[in-house]
Image (spheres, rainbow, N blue to C red):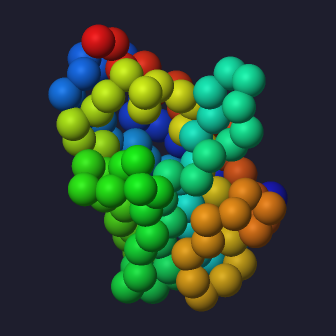
Amino acid sequence: QVQLVESGGGLVQAGGSLRLSCAASGLTFSSYAMGWFRRTPGKEREFVSAISKSGGATKYADSVKGRFTISRDNAKNMVYLQMNSLKPEDTAIYYCGARLSVVPGALYNEYNYWGQGTQVTVSS
């Protein structure tokens, strides 16, 4: 049974930092590209960042480029999202997804598995 479990969310002031983690189990982690998406009430799930299965290629939404960094540790079955210079508009539930592919993807329907999400709240 595939499980993706996000952690690291919380409440932070604008300008602060958080590091999200996603622990994967039940799948051959190194065969999957991984991604982070976020959702706010009333909106569709929005692409944030993704990383190839090897970690050699990454992709970012324009809104987070230069502030967020995605990384992965295939030995630990973990993917991370370092979020710096946080803004109130980054407030959302953040989801980790796994995509059976070499390359990172930015489309929600390309992903095979999802975690339950972790709440990030940025106060102004």
The residue located at (41%, 56%) in the rendering is 62
The residue located at (19%, 28%) in the rendering is 15
**Extreme front residue here?**
62
Q: In the image, residue 16 lies at what x, y percent?
A: 20, 28
Q: Relative to 8, does residue 56 appear above or below in the rendering? A: below
The quadrant holding residue 57 is bottom left
Q: Can residue 84 be seen in this view?
A: yes
Which one is nearer the viewer's eye here, 58 or 55? 58
**Extreme top residue here?**
124
Q: In the image, residue 39 lies at what x, y percent?
A: 63, 34
The quadrant holding residue 34 is bottom right
Q: Relative to 10, does residue 33 appear above or below in the rendering? A: below
Q: Relative to 67, does residue 121 appear above or below in the rendering? A: above
- Residue 76 falls left or right of residue 53: left
Q: In the image, residue 92 lies at what x, y percent?
A: 53, 28
Quarter of the image that includes the C terminus: top left
Quarter of the image that includes the N terminus: bottom right
- Residue 82 falls left or right of residue 25: left
Which one is nearer the viewer's eye here, 81 or 38? 38
The residue located at (50%, 52%) in the rendering is 48
Q: In the image, residue 10 lies at what x, y percent?
A: 40, 22
